[in-house]
Amino acid sequence: MKSSPVSRRNFLAGTSLGLLGAAGVPLQSAESKQYEPSSIDTRANRVSLVDARWISHSNFLTRQLAQPQRVSAEPVITPAGAAGTILPADDGGFVMWYSTTHSVPVKGGKTHQSWIHYATSKDGITFQKPDLGIHQGNVIIKGNQSGADGKPLTGIRGCSGFSVLDAKHQKVPHARARYTALYRSWIPNRPGGLLLAHSEDGLRWTEYPENAVRVGASDTFNNFFYDERIKKYVAYVRPRLHAGGSHVNRLVARIVSDDMIHWNDERVVLDTDDQDAPAVGTVNEATHPDGTRYPRGRDKQFYGLTATPYGDLYLGLASLYDVEPGTMSIELVHSYDGIDWRREATRGALISPGDKESWDSAIIYYPLMGNPVEVGDNWLIYYHGTNFDHHMRNRSRKELGEYRAMGAVQLKRDRLIGYQAGKTRGELLTQPFKWEGKELFLNASAEGGQAQVVVCNSNGSTLKGFQLSKSVPIHQEGVRLPVSFNEGASLATLKGRDIRLRIYLQNATVFGWEVA
């Protein structure tokens, strides 16, 4: 479906990452010790090896970044921008808020307007667009919209991004209704910037009278969540204050709040460096009034970050902009405190643009808040894709025009990072942790190879009955492969002991483990 042509800036501003509720991966409880970035919560019942703090040492293993597969050659929703949120529905399915961009007439010309839509799904792949009776079809918010109380909710350009928290399924201590949304808008005769709204049904919204809660532009997908570790709300935005020139602002900043209303402690937490690109861009898109160009930073820049608590750390899906070709991809980052974000050594893309025949051949960015979504043994990650690059050049499917839609990729749960061995047997030694379970399961791929587990005491000495010669080899693929030992050795007998695991791999990959 073709969309109305808009300028390069509006093209991106109208399509504005998120909050993962990873089932079975508990956060630290309110009663736990003060969070220390260098520590791990050894009580976790499901461990992902994204978190390298679990590893004491590895030998002849390679840390591998996942390469998720698209669920389909076609989008899951079109037209669409993935500047929104996906959350669990009460019926066991999912609800989604997403945006579209439209060119609308105004006095003296036209402007772009962002609309917010509401969709539902049973399986996370096929979505329904219900006729809601608010606007046409499944549109719930347009430009110059009034809220449920009759007061202005948006300005002429609608709202950019829509980050939603659900107090029924998430911790939202200051919620004024079931749903709370953070979005960007400019209401006439009032300061513009980041606004809040609340809703009981997720369809009809009422703005906070305190708006705007953060004044000023933040031209990215601004997303937020309540961080139980520090008992504050955390948002990831584009900074107002930074080093360098005034337009070197394609960076990610973090702000915090005690009550969602008052935000402070802004600091830049994610930027590219000279390993990514030269210090001054060779393609400078911005110009001064006299036509001279000025730099926007390096040739690679972070356009945005969707962040979410995940187990004992934070996952980030970062939109990385490559200036010269005008393309974008999504890079996986992670953090132990939400401030210091770690990138994989290879700095490879988690999700790259498609090939020359695909609808998303130019830009992959702004994943939904709520990613990844868990469906059975799989994860789904939703992103916004286009066939037009940032320089407004069509890179594929000329007949589509300026095509914008939402795609999805799929991978097995907790498999963003794996440790892989080839023909030479490799070994992974874990940090010590207290064993409180009865059974152990590996998340591993060992088809055509094998994985074995040895149990040691905290000093690394093998425990009797759990040595390599007793370990039953695993030759399967699965997210929950049972670990067992010959002659009836039971892990349940180790309850309360401090142990380490030695995981031996040959032509196999381990992604984590689960304690039950």
Image (cartoon, rainbow, N blue to C red):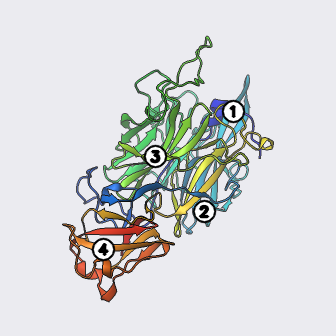
Q: Amino acid at mark 3?
A: Thr
Is residue 271 left or right of 203 when viewed as pictured?
left
Q: Amino acid at mark 4?
A: Val
Q: Earlier in the sequence, mark 1 or mark 2?
A: 2
Question: Badge 3 is on which residue?
Answer: 346
Question: Badge 4 is on which residue?
Answer: 454
Q: Tell which tag, 1 or 2, sits nearer the viewer.
A: 1
Can you tell which mark lies on residue 392? 1
Q: Is residue 482 above or below residue 357?
A: below
Element carrying mark 3: loop
Q: Alpha-carbon distance for marks 1 and 3?
A: 29 Å
Is residue 266 left or right of 161 when viewed as pictured?
left
**Residue 61 in view (yes/no):** yes
Question: Badge 2 is on which residue?
Answer: 124
Q: Earlier in the sequence, mark 2 or mark 4?
A: 2
Badge 4: few (under 14), some or many (20 or more) residues near its Cα, within 10 Å?
Answer: many
Is residue 108 left or right of 229 when viewed as pictured?
right
Q: Earlier in the sequence, mark 1 or mark 4?
A: 1
Element carrying mark 4: strand
Q: Amino acid at mark 1?
A: Met
Circles 1 and 3, Cβ within 8 Å, touching? The answer is no
Q: Alpha-carbon distance for marks 1 and 2?
A: 31 Å
